Amino acid sequence: MIPKKIGKYEIVRELGRGATSAVFEAVDPFTSRRVAIKWVLPEALSDSEHGKRYRKLFVTEASLAGKLSHPHIATIFDAVAEDEGSYIVMEYVDGGTLERYVRPESLLPIPQVLEIVFKCCKALDYAAKQGVIHRDIKPANILLTKDNQIKITDFGAALTASAQTTQVSGIGSPAYMSPQQVREVSLNHQTDIYSLGVVLYQLLTGRLPFQAQNNYSLIYHVVNSEPALPSRYRPEVSPDIDAIVTRAMQKTTEARYPTWEAFSFDLANAFGSLSSRVEVIPDSEKFNTLRGLDFFRPFSDVELWEVLRITNWHRHPRDTVLIREGEVGKSFFVLAGGEVKVTKQERLLNVLRTGACFGEMAHLTHHQFVRTASVAAVSAITVIEIQSERLLQASENCRHQFNGAFLTMLVDRLALANTRLSHLLAERPTAAS
């Protein structure tokens, strides 16, 4: 029977049910926010054999409420443990898990697979830096939204650096466990790298790297056997993607990717080398581009993902006019690649190169701003457009970083202008001459 309410939350429908919990879509009546509620079944907590373990899993996940704030991790808003029921209130994600895409008949395009795993890398890197190792990465714990964003969920099995109680051992899904995890030795973030490597293998091929009749046989293969390359089951998988999967799933931590950054770097490079490159600029390329631009250097990874959300990216051929003198400005731009020229009444004022910001007065002035110069491409360019209205809707931290970048840029321009003025004055003839 589906309850009408859990705590203050009004239940809309049941989303799924397992052996220990049920998940409901609900509404917070005070904020009208849609949420997902994981309700731990009372019989699970009272189970004489496993109740203690289930309770620890609940406490582990509940302890992360408000602590992991990343666009690709499902946010935990609240957790309640009461006699009449224990539950966790999470961000509602309108979509399903990756489980539907790990069958041979329903595989995603390879570029999309690389994008998904790239985003998982960045999210799990963030979690690791907060002292959290997931330990149960698998398709069922990765949600895919309708706009192709991912959300990692279910941190009940996580190792946390701040935990005050003994961590639960012997948990996780054997097919995705690293050799270190099945041996129950000390773990670090590289156990999640292995698990995500298995997910990548499965998304590419529609099958697990190891097939076995039972868990004992499966664990033997995890520890001792080498899987076939993904290209054996999907010929269009390139050698560099085979190599990425192989390195992520190495038996020893010494041979495996040492960092999430190294894993995500190779994924981005593999995407860039695909012959069937899509016209839309992928998020992995956008993220890595932002990380390499001086303008965005002070931004955290979380703030960069927000920048991706509020910006428009375009590739333009040579001679494309981005700003016209005399027009009312509503956007500013950051040049992500190529060169543009700045002209006023057809007179060349400047040439700007990759990393330059221009048109920012449309945002910095509080009234309608008329452009005083034109900007056009002098080569093929990639440009990031930020509408002033969208930036005003960004988080306070993100806006603060933009303001800091503007201030640094204006100070640099003022210093350059002073240097030029000094040179001009030094070159002026004196009255005696």
Image (spheres, rainbow, N blue to C red):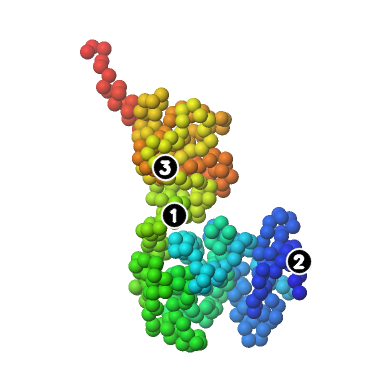
Secondary element at tag 1:
loop
Report which quarter residue 423 is drawn in.
top left
Earlier in the chain: of badge 2 and badge 3, it is 2
| Discs 2, 3 touching: Cβ within 8 Å | no
Nearer to us: label 1 or label 2: 1
Q: Is residue 236 visible?
A: yes
Quarter of the rendering occupied by the N terminus: bottom right
Q: Nearer the viewer, residue 196 or 82?
A: 196
Residue type of the residue flagged with mark 2: Lys
Secondary element at tag 3:
strand
Residue at (42, 33) in percent of width and height: 375
Secondary element at tag 2:
strand
Q: Nearer the viewer, residue 302 or 84?
A: 302
Q: Quick check: 135 left or right of 83?
A: left
Residue 104 position in % (x across, y down): 49, 73
Q: Nearer the viewer, residue 9 or 66?
A: 9
Instruction: Give the spatial CA distance, label 2 vs label 3.
Output: 53 Å
Q: Quick check: 122 left or right of 23?
A: left
Residue 198 position in % (x across, y down): 45, 73
Q: Is residue 164 visible?
A: no
Earlier in the chain: of badge 3 and badge 1, it is 1
Residue 226 position in % (x across, y down): 38, 80
Residue 144 position in % (x across, y down): 56, 63
Against 84, residue 405 (above or below) is: above
Q: Circle 2 sits on which residue? A: 5
Q: Circle 1 sits on which residue? A: 278
Question: In the drawing, what numbered circle is on residue 316?
Answer: 3
Instruction: Give the spatial CA distance, label 1 vs label 2.
Output: 46 Å
Instruction: Give the spatial CA distance, label 3 vs label 1.
Output: 15 Å
